[in-house]
Structure formats: C-alpha cells, structure tokens
Image (tube, rainbow, N blue to C red):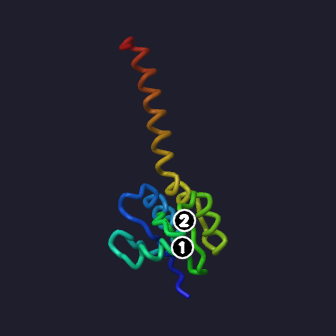
C-alpha cells in the first residue's frame, strides 16, 4: 500500500492551497491531481462524491476519503494515521483566516491613528 495521500482538485478551488499547505508542513507525502486535466480523476471524484465533482477530495493510504474537509477534520485524520500535525501545519491550514484577521487589525490601527491625527 502506498503511503501517499491523493489530493484531487482544480486551480480555481480556494481550499486547495490550505490543504496542500497543511500536508506540506506536516511532511505528508501527497500527489495533487487536477480533475480538469484528468478525466479519469474527475470520474473517480464523482464516484466518491455521489456524482459531484466536489474538491478538494483526498484519498488516504488506508482507502478512506475526505471531501472538502475542514482543517480540524484533516488534522484529526492525519493524526489517526500517525502523522504529527504541529503548529506550523495548523498555521498553514488556517493561513487565509490569519491573513483576514491580520488585515482587519491593521485597518483598525490605521483608522485609529488617522483619527488621532484629525484626518477624519
């Protein structure tokens, strides 16, 4: 049995980046397959997901699959397979949320500074 996780997706899926980031940081071997470039892969995704091309769909070495998993679901699955998911992996999986929060904090600070300067 291979120890590689298969990640099915396509370039416009916003969740592929966080999934690949988490897998990379957790040092999990994976193969990414673009279902828009591979009709057999698209058929496999549809077979797993009751006819839907839902991505990301991950197929694990134990034969199980996760479709559109949350970071917590993926972390739990990887840990159940013996992988250590550390802080860096968690951060990689939550990168989008962290960027939005940081941007919000930065904007709030900027508004506060501008108000204190009497700009508005």
Q: Which mark is residue 23?
A: none
Report the side of 64 relative to 105 (left or right): right
Residue at position x 64%, y 64% in the image = 76
Q: Residue at x 53, y 61 (%)?
A: 68
The CA distance from mark 2 to mark 1 is: 9 Å
Quick one: quadrant of the N terminus? bottom right
Task: Out of 13 and 29, give the one closest to the viewer.
Answer: 13
Crowd band around label 2 with a 10 angstrom C-alpha radius: few (<14), some (14–19), many (20+):
some
First reached walking from the N terminus: tag 2 or tag 1: 1
Quarter placement of the C terminus: top left
Instruction: Name the residue beneath numbered marker 1.
Output: 48
Nearer to the camera, 109 or 63: 63
Q: Callout 1 environment at 10 Å: few (<14), some (14 to 19), or many (20+)?
A: some
Q: Work out which residue is located at the far top of the displayed protein and give it.
A: 118
Q: Are marks 2 and 1 in contact (CB under 8 Å)?
A: yes
* Residue ID for mark 2: 67
The residue at 39%/11% (across/down) is 118
User: In the orientation shown, which residue stands out farthest toward the right?
Assistant: 80
Q: Secondary structure at mark 2?
A: strand
Q: Position of residue 73 (x, y in %)?
A: 62, 61
């Amino acid at each position: 049995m291979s120890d590689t996780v298969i990640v099915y997706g396509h370039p416009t899926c916003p969740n592929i980046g966080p999934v690949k980031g988490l897998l990379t940081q957790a040092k999990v071997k994976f193969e990414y397959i673009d279902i828009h470039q591979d009709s057999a892969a698209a058929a496999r995704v549809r077979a797993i997901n009751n006819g839907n091309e839902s991505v990301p769909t991950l197929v694990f070495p134990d034969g199980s699959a996760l479709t559109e998993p949350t970071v917590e679901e993926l972390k739990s699955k990887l840990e159940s397979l013996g992988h250590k998911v550390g802080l860096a992996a968690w951060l990689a999986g939550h990168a989008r949320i962290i960027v939005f929060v940081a941007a919000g904090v930065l904007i709030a600070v900027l508004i506060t500074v501008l108000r204190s300067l009497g700009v508005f």
